[in-house]
Amino acid sequence: MSAIDAAAKVLGEARAPLNTKEMVEKMSAKGYWSSPGGKTPHATL
């Protein structure tokens, strides 16, 4: 799943607004997407 698709899925499941750092944390925790080693995945998203 791409980062954009994972972000859309996480936002759709969220009950509150999320910032990009929160989205990346949830995307990784749920196994939807994880950074391939970048230092700032939230900035990339």
Image: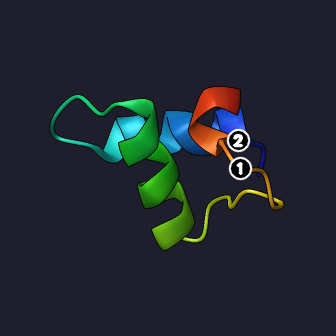
Q: Residue at x 45, y 57 (%)?
A: 25
In which quarter of the view is residue 3 placed?
top right
Which element carries disc 1, helix, strand or loop? loop
Residue 10 visible at all: no
Q: Residue furthest toward the right?
A: 36
User: What amino acid does circle 2 point to?
Assistant: Ala
Q: Give x and y (percent) for residue 22.
A: 36, 46
Comparing 26 with 44, the one in front is: 44
User: Horizontal placement of 34 versus 37: left or right?
Assistant: left
Earlier-in-chain disc, 2 versus 1: 2
Between the C-alphas of marks 2 and 1, the distance is 15 Å
**Vertical placement of residue 44 versus 41, above or below:** above
Which element carries disc 2, helix, strand or loop? helix
Q: Residue furthest toward the front?
A: 39
**Vertical placement of residue 36 versus 31, above or below:** above
**Vertical placement of residue 41 versus 28, above or below:** above
- Disc tally is 2
Comparing 45 with 13, the one in front is: 45
Q: Give x and y (percent) for residue 18.
A: 29, 34
Residue tagged 1: 39
Q: Residue at x 77, y 52 (%)?
A: 1
Which mark is on residue 3? 2
**Vertical placement of residue 44 versus 15, above or below:** above
Asked whether the residues under the numbered discs 2 and 1 touch, taking CB atoms below 8 Å apart as contact, a structural biologist would say no
Residue 26 visible at all: yes
Q: Residue at x 62, y 61 (%)?
A: 32
Comparing 8 with 42, the one in front is: 42
Q: Residue at x 16, y 34 (%)?
A: 16
Foreground tag (2 vs 1): 1
